Amino acid sequence: MASLTANAHVEPSGPRPKRIGPGRYGVYAFLIISALFFLIPLYVMIVTSLKPMDEIRMGNLFALPGSPSFDAWIKAWSQACTGLNCEGIHVGMLNSIKILIPSVILSIAVGSVTGYALSFWRPKGANILFAILLLGAFIPYQVFLYPLVRILSMVSLYNSIPGVVFVHTIFGLPLMTLLFRNFYAGIPIDLFKAARVDGGGFWAIFLRLMLPLSTPIIVVAAILQITGIWNDFLFGLIFAGRENFPMTVQLNNVVNSSFGEKEYNVNMAATILTALVPLFVYFVSGRWFVRGIASGAVKG
């Protein structure tokens, strides 16, 4: 006891370690450069959207606006021309929401049930089915376009919102199945067996046991699907139809318009407005996204 008391007062010898060394300075420099790499384009877009065209023509890209104005934002939202239609990109935002909500819900619902079935019930040929689903995720989308156009035309879904929702659901199925299957693989099988002993069936176990445990992976899946579907351009252009173009397609029509003067402030404002939804989702749910990944969402 006396020896322990004596050792407790012994001061460590040698030089005191430096709190910040060259390695730490290097890490800080890398992080600052990386942050600037992504933030400088955003800064240029914001300041350009707040400038009138007279200031933009002066060519000082990084200068702050002399007299900031939101006129370009208002025009991009409600007056910008997309072809012959000059109602702004708010119409595209409504179309994107109509496409996004059912696509996210359906893809997560189908993917969760499929992942649950492959993890616990293991029907005959489950591994082959899972391999085929994963293979489908790596085949380029362009291979499917023409057959899908023909199929959707035959069932009268081509050029419609239900048609593009169907396409997003189908193409989201491999990733959603992979996420949910790997997540459910981390749940103890004894829990499932106990539910079976208590008389639980396929849907009862899924709805009353597995689904309440699935909050982390549902958040991860929702963020991935919201970002992917909202930023989609190809499927919206081909399958949605002219009257249902999503926001990304209408943004392309605004930016690449060949009529009149190039209004860079309006283009920048329209681009930022188009990116607001994914940014909002990431800022609001980023903490749960990290928790979902840490809880096993992407392992396997």
Image (tube, helix red, strand yellow):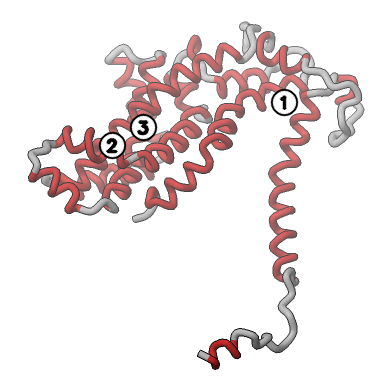
Location of the C terminus by quadrant is: bottom left
Q: Quadrant of residue 26?
A: bottom right
Asked if marks 3 and 2 touch (Cβ < 8 Å), the reply is no
**Real-space Cα distance between discs 3 and 2?**
32 Å
Residue nearer the viewer, 215 or 52: 215
Identify the residue position indicated by label 1 in the image. Answer: 268
- Placement of 280 over or under 189, stated as above or below: above
Q: Which residue is mark 2?
A: 211
Camera-side residue of 23 and 229: 23
> For numbered disc 3, what is the local secondary structure?
helix
Residue 196: x %, y % from top left: 10, 43
| Residue 107 versus residue 257 in the image, above or below | below
Q: Amino acid at mark 3?
A: Phe
Q: Amino acid at mark 2?
A: Leu
Label 2: which secondary element: helix
Q: Earlier in the sequence, mark 1 or mark 3?
A: 3
Where is mark 3, residue-wise?
A: 144
Q: Closest to the observer: 7 or 170?
A: 7
The residues tagged by marks 1 and 3 sit, at their Cα atoms, a distance apart of 33 Å
- Residue 62 picture quarter: top right
